[in-house]
Amino acid sequence: MGEVFRIEPAMPPEAYKTFRITSPLKTHMRQATCEEIGCDQYRNGWRVHVEALTPDVVHAAKTAGRRYREEHLGEGQTWLVFEAGQPCFRARQHRAPLGRPPLYVVQDGDHRGNPRGTKARVHARPSDWVENFAEHQQALADEIKKG
């Protein structure tokens, strides 16, 4: 993934308030198997181009305990072809939701931080978060109208 595109803020971070809905990995997700998440590599198998890898990565792939065969298609075209139905090399990164509701958070600051160090507020109900957001938007509109 590339970097996030952000417009440079016109004011310091303490002039902003952040409203977000989040489901943190630590509290809302668990490790999952390739089969559980419908991993394409698990379902269809996968292949890696040997010449594009360093020798230590090739060794790791060959000794990872997955079933594979080597295909030599020509000069510089050697592939390790891994069978379907076995964990992919990213299996430890697969996550599945625990079914917990998301957190509705309001905090001072923006992506640059919270300079005042105030504690974030986590709303108990989504409707409270929406109301807080609407009130904040109205306050901003009122200030803009004042000039």
Image: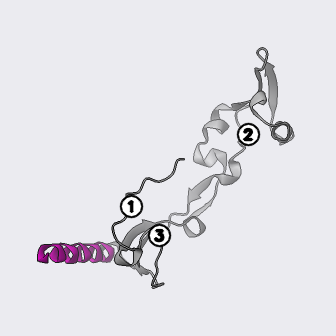
Find disc 2 in the rendering and name its residue: 86
Q: Residue sitting at 78 percent across and 14 percent down?
A: 74
State the CA–CA distance, disc 2 to disc 3: 42 Å
Label located before the other in sequence (2 or 3):
2
Residue 19 x %, y %: 37, 71
- C-alpha separation, residue under disc 3 versus residue under disc 1: 11 Å
Of marks 2 and 1, which one's residue comes earlier in the chain?
Answer: 1
- Residue hosting label 1: 8
- 14 sits to left or right of 145: right
User: What's the coloring here?
Assistant: one colour
Residue at the spot x=53%, y=67% of the render? 24
Residue assigned mark 3: 112
Secondary element under disc 2, as helix, strand or loop, is: loop
Residue 62: assigned label = none
Q: Is residue 71 magenta?
A: no
Mark 1 residue element? loop
Provide the residue span drawn in magenta.
Answer: 128-147
- Residue visible at 76% across and 20% down? 77
Residue extending farthest top: 74
Front: mark 3 or 1: 1
Front label number (2 vs 3): 3
Percent of width and height locating residue 73: 76, 15
118, 133: nearer the viewer: 118
Q: Main secondary structure of the magenta part?
A: helix
Does any portion of residue 106 appear in the rendered image? Answer: no
Q: Few, some or many C-alpha atoms within 10 Å of disc 3 (few <14, some 14-19, many ≥20)?
A: few
